[in-house]
Image (cartoon, rainbow, N blue to C red):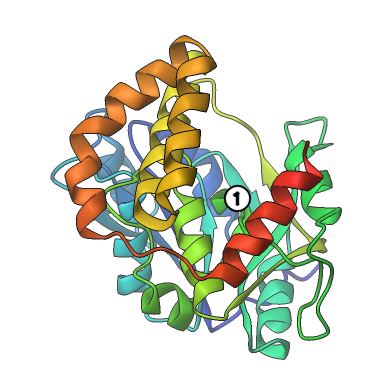
Amino acid sequence: MSSPARPDDVTVVVMSQNRREDLLATLPRHEAPVVLVDNASTDGTVEAVRATLPEVTVLPQEHNTGSYARTVGVEHAGTAFVAFADDDSWWAPGDLARAAEIMRAHPRLAVLNARILVGPQERLDPICAEMARSPLGTPADLPGPALLGFVACGAMVRTEAFLAVGGFDDVVRFPGEEERLALDLAAAGWGMAYVDGVTVHHHPSPRRHAPEQRRAAIWRSRLLTAVMRRPWPDVGRLVLEALRTGAPGRRGVLRAIPEVPAALRRRRVVPERVRADLRMLAEATT
């Protein structure tokens, strides 16, 4: 059986920290050139990948830059499209080329979010069912339901659009980094869509943060994104919601406070048409 064709206009960008064994298992699965941006691992990741997979470009960072590492990878890639993957995810055979073909056929499409199958059981990630039911509909110039967010480990981006809005930043960091980027893409007129016919496999690593720690980090990202892009009444409501949700929300507020000055320096409220879409999405989930 012949292997799927490698797309010549796609790079896979992976960011990671201290996941050496996961990377050694998943990096060989990618059917396009790979750029690994290592967030200051201390487990020998850089040396192991360079020794075992010399075809992978490794960009070691001096400190953990969070999701900004992906921006570093996109800037280095130099291809028209970049597919993101985590150290525990990979695109199904042939689907990098298929996603790139869809991107080429839809010039307003900035982000293609693939179907994500989780674990050896290949369960559909619940977020994919939500994206498939997006109340924003399916515009004629997009290949699937329109989105105002995405899941980075299952997304392909148009490099031009990604870099034009600044990519992932070093304020929001990780996780929950997708929201600010999605808002800026929408504000600039770019489209995002869910495409069920393209698949990403995600086998969550056992080396993960505790659930409460992750929830606190997500609250931190939500709050900082709101400071950067939402009207002040929305920010106030979100702070109150975080405080009322319990310990993770309160920790998220405390973790966001030191970064508020940096968020304020980048504050640019999204236009009303984007806020209207946000309200539509909120109403659909209540």
235 w.r.t. 219: above or below: below
Q: Which residue is mark 1?
A: 151
User: Quadrant of the image for the C terminus?
Assistant: top right
195 w.r.t. 239: above or below: below
Q: Give the image location of residue 152, x and y in percent.
A: 54, 52
Q: Is residue 148 visible?
A: yes
94 w.r.t. 153: above or below: below
Q: Give the image location of residue 95, x and y in percent.
A: 73, 66
Residue 91 located left or right of residue 255: right
Residue drawn at (65%, 34%), measured in percent from left and top? Answer: 203
Q: In terms of secondary structure, where does tag 1 sit?
A: loop
Q: Residue furthest front?
A: 233
Q: Is residue 200 visible?
A: no
Residue drawn at (26%, 50%), measured in percent from left and top? Answer: 263
Residue drawn at (55%, 39%), measured in percent from left and top? Answer: 88
Q: Amino acid at mark 1?
A: Val
Total labels drawn = 1
User: Quadrant of the image for the N terminus?
Assistant: bottom right
Nearest to the observer: residue 132 or residue 44: 132
Nearest to the observer: residue 169 or residue 188: 188
Quadrant hosting residue 109? bottom right
Q: Give the image location of residue 29, x and y in percent.
A: 60, 53
Residue 88 located left or right of residue 55: right
Q: Give the image location of residue 36, x and y in percent.
A: 36, 54
Quadrant hosting residue 255? top left
213 w.r.t. 263: above or below: above
Q: Residue furthest top?
A: 247
Residue 135 located left or right of residue 252: right
Q: Label 1 crowding class (10 Å Cα cut-off): few <14, some 14-19, many 20+? A: many
